[in-house]
Amino acid sequence: MHLVDILEKYDAFCFDGYGTLYNRGSFVYPGAKEWFGELRRRGKEIRLVTNAASNLDQALADEADARGFDFSAAETISSGSLLKGWLSRLPAGGSPFAAGREVFYIGRPTGVNVLAECGIDAVENPVSPVVAISSSTATDEMYAQALSILKKPGALLLVLNPDAWAPKIDGTRAPVSGELCERLRRESGCAAEYFGKPFPGIWQKVKASLPAGSKAIMIGDTLGTDVYGAYVAGFDSALVIGRNEPAAELAADEKLLGVRPTYYLEP
C-alpha cells in the first residue's frame, strides 16, 4: 500500500518522527518529504506525534523543519509535553514531589528544558526519590545512582520516552530509554508513570488538537507504540515495515501484542 492509496480516506494524518520520516542528523527516509508535501498540498491536518522528550515542542518542530518538515509547534505533540498536565493533576500533599520538585535526570542535555517548563530541577540527589528518563544516555555510574534512588520507599520513575527500540540509519536497531527504564523498574520494584505512545494521555491531546469529527490515521514504524497506540486511540494505523519492526519478526510480534496495522505502507 502507498500513501496515495489512502489519501482520500482520512482528514488527519499523524506521523511518528524518528524511524518514519527521518533519523539522526539530517537523514530523511526516501519518500517521506513527498508524503508530507502531498498532504500539505491537499490541505490535510498533519500532526507529529512523538515520544521524543528531549526538548520542548517548539524546539522539536524546529528540528523537524530543518529536515524539511514544517510542523508548527501546535502540530507537534510530544511525550515530554504531557508532564506539565500530569503534574497539575497530582493531589495536594500526596504528590511524589511533596518535599520539592527535584529529580535525578537521565537524558540529553536539552531535556532539562522540559523539566524546567514544569518547575522541576535536575539534581544529583533529589529530596524526593524521583527519577526522570528521556533517553538511554546513562553511564554505569548514573544507572547505579538511579537504582539507588528508586529503591527508596515511595520512589517513582517518570518514563518520559517509553520507546524500547530505535532504528539506526544502517537498518539495524538498538535498545533505548524504554528498555533502560524497564530494567530499572524491575530491579528496584518502584512505581512508574509512563508518558507518550502507546498510552492514552498523548492520544487525548492529539484528539483535542484536531477538528471535531476528523477521521485520523497514525503512521509509524513501530508495532508496540505506533500501531498499538493507534488502537488505544481508536485510530486506523499504517506501519512502515523494516525499520523498527523487522519484517521477519512482524507476524510473531503481531500475535504477541494482539494488534495488526490497518495498512502496511511502502515509501
Image (spheres, rainbow, N blue to C red):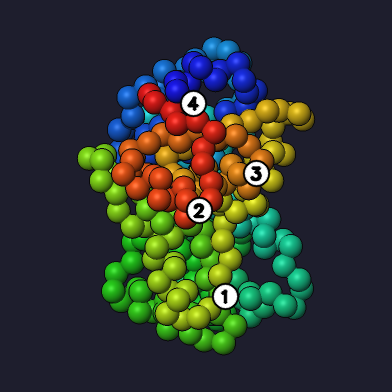
Residue nearest the observer in this picture, 77 or 38: 38
Picture coordinates of residue 193 (x, y %)?
58, 66
Q: Earlier in the sequence, mark 1 or mark 3?
A: 1
Q: Which residue is mark 3?
A: 233
Q: Which residue is mark 4?
A: 70
Residue at 33% across, 30% down: 28
Horizontally, residue 182 falls left or right of residue 127, namely left
Q: Residues within 10 Å of mark 2 (few under 14, many from 20)?
A: few
The quadrant in which the N terminus is found is top left
Q: Which residue is mark 2?
A: 257
Dot 1: what SS? strand
User: Disc 3 or disc 2, which is closer to the eye?
Assistant: 2
Residue type pointed to by label 3? Ala
Dot 2: what SS? helix
Residue 213 found in image quarter: top right
Would residue 20 be visible to someone looking at this image?
no
Would residue 234 be visible to someone looking at this image?
yes
The CA span between labels 4 and 2 is: 33 Å
Residue type pointed to by label 1? Ala
User: Disc 4 or disc 1, which is closer to the eye?
Assistant: 1
Q: Earlier in the sequence, mark 4 or mark 1?
A: 4
The answer to whether the residues at label 4 and label 3 have Cβ atoms under 8 Å apart is no
Q: Is residue 217 above or below residue 190?
A: above
User: Disc 1 or disc 3, which is closer to the eye?
Assistant: 3
Q: Is residue 179 above or below residue 248?
A: below
